[in-house]
Amino acid sequence: MSIPQILMLYRSILERGLVAALRDPVSEEGVSYNVDSLYTILRYHVGLYDEKGRAEKALGKMLRPSLLLFTTQELKGDVKGALPAAVALELVHNFSLIHDDIQDHDELRRGRSTVWKLIGVAQAINAGDLMYSIAIRNALVAGADAAGAIIDAARVMIEGQGLDLSFESRWVDANSYIDMIDKKTGALICCAFRTGGIIAQTDGATLDRLTSLGRELGRAFQIRDDLLGVWGDGDVTGKPQGSDIRRKKKSFPVVLAMQRADEEGKMLLERVYAQERVTDGDVERVIGMMTDLGVKKSGEETVERHLKEASGYLERLPLSEEGRGLMNELIEYLARREK
Amino acid sequence: MSIPQILMLYRSILERGLVAALRDPVSEEGVSYNVDSLYTILRYHVGLYDEKGRAEKALGKMLRPSLLLFTTQELKGDVKGALPAAVALELVHNFSLIHDDIQDHDELRRGRSTVWKLIGVAQAINAGDLMYSIAIRNALVAGADAAGAIIDAARVMIEGQGLDLSFESRWVDANSYIDMIDKKTGALICCAFRTGGIIAQTDGATLDRLTSLGRELGRAFQIRDDLLGVWGDGDVTGKPQGSDIRRKKKSFPVVLAMQRADEEGKMLLERVYAQERVTDGDVERVIGMMTDLGVKKSGEETVERHLKEASGYLERLPLSEEGRGLMNELIEYLARREK
């Protein structure tokens, strides 16, 4: 399925923004200096270059900054003035990915080696810290209110990551799961809409609707992601089928399965998730059980429900007809995306 | 030797600031929620509480925020308004310590378990990220200029940490070493003086002198630290004698020793630093060689030289007589401190 237009509109301006933000710093004497490979690896991570420093087009979806610029534009704000905030948001997201990959021991991201795999854990922690610093510096350029919104969202995202990590050692119910993804994923997506609204100096009621829209889209986005983490086609997602089970993530499908399983099913899940290594057979058994329990169908329904909620908030926002069409296309995409 | 008065003057106001900054966040419904133990561990790390959450007085020297508040006060700025910036600076420093301890595999800091040792590497990375976020949020409260100065300094500090890590796999000369410590240590100390000056709205020439003062003090501070890392009394520093050699840090003494050693000495250093584990015998041999090469004495002279430079800048700053006395006492302390 084709990429929705809203994610294409701002790609070149965002790419230029990222290039400028991740340029090697210039010393007081006007000479650009290379702090070893730190900036190089950041440019690699966001997909501007390959491992050898050759130009590459491997940028991600850039969902968050696109939504920020779109919102600014639709609410008649200064899109050019919003660029540093959009870049900041994309860099906050990317900083979190660098650290996530260390925490999850993931060796690949979108088919490319992860940062820690290339430069080791110690320097990768540092690379993430640097990315975060550059993000905040860009946020400050967008003004105190925008910067405040972005740094608050980053903090909440980090709290969500903390919850997600803590879930590795305990079982949680659906409410705790939703609370976690609202923080881990929802915070930055809400922030994209909100910050667009802040920059366009919109009113409080509109800001509230933008926040609600972001929350619902965030939930739909993350639950869809979790479904792909179990049932996704490895050739399309870049991760093997059942990868989230293999990594023992307490993602949506397993939370729901645990809730619905009978005693025998609960024991299977307990056993699989208590193991050091999850075997192929276990992955198959768990997926089979999830399918029997109707988890996939319920997940898809849950995604649809949140997208419907999102549509409700969308209708009450003062968007152009064209803008509404673009958002509806995005919603359609988020419901069915395969990667 | 007793703690200089400048480090005592602001302790209680800083402690209150840290308590407020690291409080559990409050939800929209006004209920404070505990994001598992993340905020608890941050309060532990800065020394407000012990591992079990019981009140403890284990705060560090708080050198950077004390210098920031002192500078603000001396330059007739609003000390109370400067508190968020001071807290921000202390939290940036503490965030870097959480990540440093992971990178260096250090299990103890000031005689207490490090964060990663208590909650694991993955969650400790996250705890550091959270601390950094809280730091920046506080910096924003102090105004855009102060926030900009703090975030710039944090970025330079992180670049310095990147250099320090990269030194583990190569030999460097004294210039590269000074460049690294100017970034890793100097940036935040410069920032303390500068930000005080910014908040007090001082003139450009004074800001330049404050920056130079910070640079010289930072060098003296770090080189003294490096000397203690080799010759320090373990009972006082909380680290075993020769600990920096054991950890194969390219600190001041070994950089200087490598520069001065004959072929045989160079081979010894190469061999020791190429080993997986450094034995007690190797530590003794390296310390002996350093002593023969006059490294300790040169180090102490270098510290003195930078402190003398610092005194020169100090004289040309518009401080009160009392303030000048406090700074001179600090300089005296930095030259001779044993921990």
Image (cartoon, coloured by chain):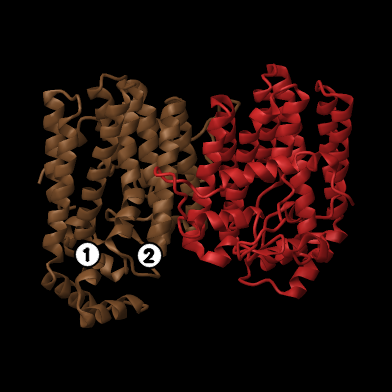
Chain colours: A brown, B red
Classify A245 as above or below A28.
Answer: below
Identity of the residue drawn at 46% across and 42% down? A132
Amino acid type at image mark 1 = Pro
* Disc number placed over residue B203 in the picture, else none: none
Residue A293 percent location from the top left of the image: 14, 71
Residue B251 percent location from the top left of the image: 71, 53
Choose between B212 and B276: the one closer to the eye. Answer: B212
Are marks 1 and 2 in one subunit? yes
Q: Quadrant of residue A211?
A: top left
Q: Which residue is mark 2?
A: A167
Disc 2 crowd, CA 10 A, few/some/many (<14, 14-19, 20+)? some
Q: Which residue is mark 1?
A: A253
Classify B54 as above or below B144.
Answer: below
Choose between B286 and A100: the one closer to the eye. Answer: A100
Identity of the residue drawn at 62% across and 56% down? B45
Residue B273 percent location from the top left of the image: 66, 64
Q: Quadrant of residue A263?
A: bottom left
Q: Is residue B115 left or right of residue A81?
A: right
On what subunit does the disc labeled 1 rest? A
Q: How many marks?
A: 2
Provide the secondary structure element on which disc 1 rests: helix
Classify B317 as above or below A290.
Answer: above
Identity of the residue drawn at 73% across and 20% down? B206
Provide the secondary structure element on which disc 2 rests: helix
Q: Is residue A214 left or right of residue B185?
A: left
On what subunit does the disc labeled 2 rest? A
The answer to which of marks 1 and 2 sits earlier in the sequence is: 2
Q: Quadrant of residue A291?
A: bottom left
